[in-house]
Amino acid sequence: MVKFIVDLGHSLGLTCTAEGVEDAKTLLYLKEVGCDLAQGYHIARPMTVEAIKTWVAQQNFRESL
């Protein structure tokens, strides 16, 4: 079902974002089906603006989902 939704979104020219990613297995599957973006506890917990600035500075964003 997820692959179908990603494919449908792409066929409509949309960027697909997965929400609520909670583990590495799910993130890997999303990569395999071509999902564009993801967010969730596996990637980062909710944080303050100051914490986000620090977190972003420490990340290597070269690898895309």
Image: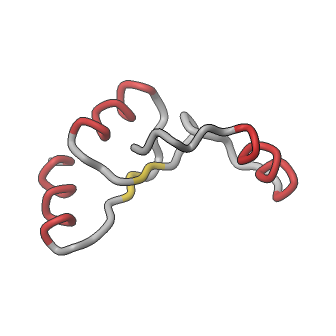
Front residue of 8 and 57: 57
Q: Quadrant of the C terminus?
A: top left
Query: Could you tell me which residue is drawn at 41 percent across and 53 percent down?
Result: 37
Q: Count the marks: how many?
A: 0
Query: Could you tell me which residue is drawn at 70 percent across and 48 percent down?
Result: 46
Question: In which quadrant of the rendered view does residue 32 lie?
Answer: top left
Q: Is residue 56 left or right of residue 12?
A: right
Query: Could you tell me which residue is drawn at 38 percent across and 57 percent down?
Result: 17
Q: Residue furthest right?
A: 50
x then y, percent, for residue 54: 82, 45
Instruction: In the rendered view, tell whether residue 12 sits above or below residue 15.
Output: below
Question: In which quadrant of the rendered view does residue 61 lie?
Answer: top right
Instruction: In the rendered view, tell whether residue 57 sits above or below residue 32.
Output: below
Q: Is residue 38 left or right of residue 9?
A: right
Q: Residue furthest front?
A: 62
Instruction: In the rendered view, tell whether residue 15 sits above or below residue 43.
Output: below
Colouring of the image: secondary structure
x then y, percent, for residue 21: 45, 41
Instruction: In the rendered view, tell whether residue 5 sits above or below residue 40.
Output: below
x then y, percent, for residue 53: 80, 52
Query: Could you tell me which residue is drawn at 51 percent across and 42 percent down?
Result: 62
x then y, percent, for residue 33: 21, 42
Q: Residue furthest bottom?
A: 12
